[in-house]
Image (cartoon, rainbow, N blue to C red):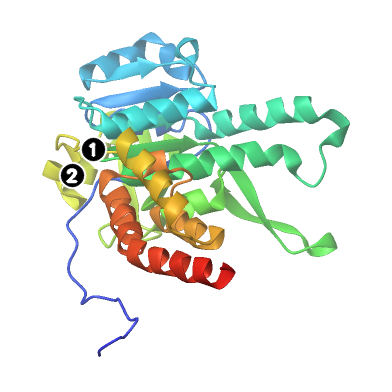
Amino acid sequence: MAGSKLKARPPVAAEMGRTKAVAFGPPGSGKTWLALSFPSPYYIDTESGAALAHYQERLKASGGVYFGRDEGSLDPATVLDQVEALATEKHSYRTLVIDSVSKLIGTITAREQDRLGDKDAFGASKKPGLVFLRRLGMWLDRLDMNVWLVAHETSKWEGAGNDRREVGQVPDLWEKMVHDLDLTLQVRRIGKGLREATIHKSRLLSFPEADRFYLQKEGQDQAYATFTERWNRDRIEAVAIQVKLASAEDCSRVRALLEVVRIAPEEIERWMAKANVETWEEMTAEQICKVVGHLQAKIPQAAATTKVEKGAKS
């Protein structure tokens, strides 16, 4: 239809992507062991739990590297810098693990509580943690790696007053973050040498919700073998493809064009939201190229408007 604003396209089958998941459960259930079974982990340890020898050996055997508290694992800006670097630089890693993201968010919140003191009202101390998670989510969406966010578990409650009751366990993590990732596993130790995962939330047909599978049986690890039976092993183990970000020249060009072309702030905000960024520098080269093209197309119109305005004033 000529002049139509409809932009939808015919559906096409998407290729299998990376595994991007949350693992939650009580201490000692096997969350870390599961994450470290994936190839070449870039392991961000916020709790120092994996500094122990047997975890370090497992990390070494899987071709991974360790980023702990001494390197800045409890500093949100440093963690975001690491994830951005993994998304944009060439490297040999296949899997990103943040263990645990609950500890990192708890630390961010505690620091803000100390800073606010008596002014901490209406959940104000939680805002920096949510800002961090939104930015982390943006980079995880771009990151061409398997992702495991390890989380503590917390009780889920329903009802109010005397009718309030505990109805189960959920990840101690922002609900939107859990929703945006593909898979959430609840991990349990159910006996000696026996660990199990229950699929808590899934958008993957090969991992139906409420299904269960062994992570360890009779002391033998089965987690990665189970995943590669259900998911494309070649995709899990593939070399990461880097994101090309907008160049400094492209960003300067956009700002220069905005001096010529009048764009409402609300429209710029929509562009940013569509690109899932907060600054021009966070856009990809492809995204910023589209912005430049759009603004350049408006220059003749902007010039004509300016000419009319000058004529009206004279």
301 relative to 238 in the view: left or right: right
The crowd level at tag 2 (other Cα within 10 Å; few <14, some 14-19, many 20+) is few
Let me know if residue 173 appears in the view.
yes
x, y percent for residue 162: 84, 61
The type of residue carrying mark 2 is Thr
* Position above or below: 90 against 178: above
x, y percent for residue 82: 38, 25
The type of residue carrying mark 1 is Tyr
33 relative to 233 in the view: left or right: right
**Residue at image point 31% right, 36% down:** 249
Which residue carries the number 1 mark? 224
Q: CA distance from mark 2 to mark 1?
A: 6 Å
Q: Judging from the image, what secondary structure is the residue with disc 1 in? A: helix
Given residues 220 and 162, the one toward you in this image is 162
x, y percent for residue 156: 63, 53
Given residues 296 and 305, the one toward you in this image is 305
**Residue at image point 25% right, 30% down:** 220
The crowd level at tag 1 (other Cα within 10 Å; few <14, some 14-19, many 20+) is some
Tell me the quarter of the picture where residue 132 sits: top right
For this orientation, the residue located farthest to the right is: 118
Quadrant where the image shows the N terminus = bottom left
x, y percent for residue 177: 49, 49
Quadrant where the image shows the C terminus = bottom right
Given residues 91 and 61, the one toward you in this image is 91
Which residue carries the number 2 mark? 228
Tell me the quarter of the picture where residue 280 sits: top left
**Residue at image point 20% right, 50% down:** 231
The disc label shown at residue 160, or none: none
